[in-house]
Amino acid sequence: MLQLQALLDADLGNANRRVNAKAPLVEERLPFTLRVVSNEADLWKAVQIRHAAYSRHVPDFAATLARPEATDFEDGVAVLLAESRLDGAPLGTMRIQTNRYKPLSLEQSLTLPDWLQGRPLAEATRLGITEERVGRVVKTALFKAYFQFCAEDGVDWMVIAGRSPIDRQYERLMFKDVYPGQGFIPLRHAGNMPHRVMALQVSQVEPTWRQASHPLYDYFFRTRHVDIDASPVMARDDGRVASPWEHDAVLATQ
């Protein structure tokens, strides 16, 4: 549990150390599990933690998140849920929307630049974590799951939007502004609150973090977390990627 304690105690913005990409993999168990939601009961758990997290900071907008949203059920969308291994309580959630079937939600509010047009993208939204101390680790694990989901699903760019000061967290993960100098943009799917839109190329995370001696390099790339399973839902016989809600049906036919 040494890396877990380090994440609880470290200032990830100021950490300075060297990483060893050739170091052997280590396995670390977490006090929670993290997976893609595949049934309505688990979705309601995700909604519970989502609503509670937004209520602490933007209560008016949170009132619109008390129930599952239509986007939660769409093809190309995965809702992540972190649950306590002790009692099953929800600890964190994130929604990942790919542009496999329709444009990203943020594209309701802005036109993406040419270098993102026509590329496989995945937008992370509806991030929510517990107020408990373990919440920092849950959030880090959610971003590892986001990265793993994108890497396995053939996504080229991770796209994210953050309010101030949350956007600084994404800076520390080395996301870059989609439109440098444009500042914060009101987003329709986020209650028209101003957000900073940022992107990170999936294939460049490992080499960029290694060169920068990023404090999360070992956690993402040198640690096996068996409690994190963000595998995209398998393809159906017709070639279309099944939504999480079809997961049990797909398994039953195999």
Image (cartoon, rainbow, N blue to C red):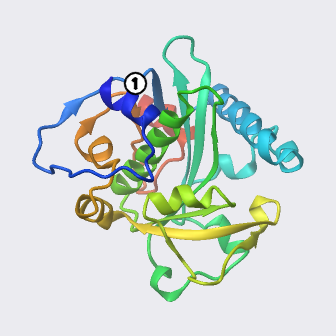
Q: Amino acid under label 1? A: Leu
* Residue 199 as seen in the image, left or right of residue 231: right
Location of residue 25 with respect to 112 vertically, above or below:
above
Residue 253 percent coordinates (x, y): 41, 33
Q: Nearer the viewer, residue 227 or 177?
A: 177
Quadrant of image for the C terminus: top left
Residue 30 percent coordinates (x, y): 40, 24
Kind of element beneath mark 1: loop
Characterize the local packing of mark 1: few (<14), some (14-19) or many (20 or more) Cα atoms within 10 angstroms.
some
Residue 39 percent coordinates (x, y): 60, 30
Q: Nearer the viewer, residue 247 or 16?
A: 16
Q: Residue furthest bottom?
A: 114
Q: Nearer the viewer, residue 36 or 215?
A: 215
* Residue 71 as seen in the image, left or right of residue 116: right
Quadrant of image for the N terminus: top left
> How many marks can you see?
1
Location of residue 187 with respect to 172 vertically, above or below:
below
Residue 90 percent coordinates (x, y): 61, 25
Task: Give the quarter of the image for residue 57.
Answer: top right
* Residue 12 as seen in the image, left or right of residue 215: right
Image point 72% across, 38% down: which residue? 53
Work out whether residue 105 can be spotted.
Answer: yes
Residue indicated by mark 1: 30
Work out whether residue 232 can be spotted.
Answer: no
Location of residue 128 with respect to 215 vertically, above or below:
above
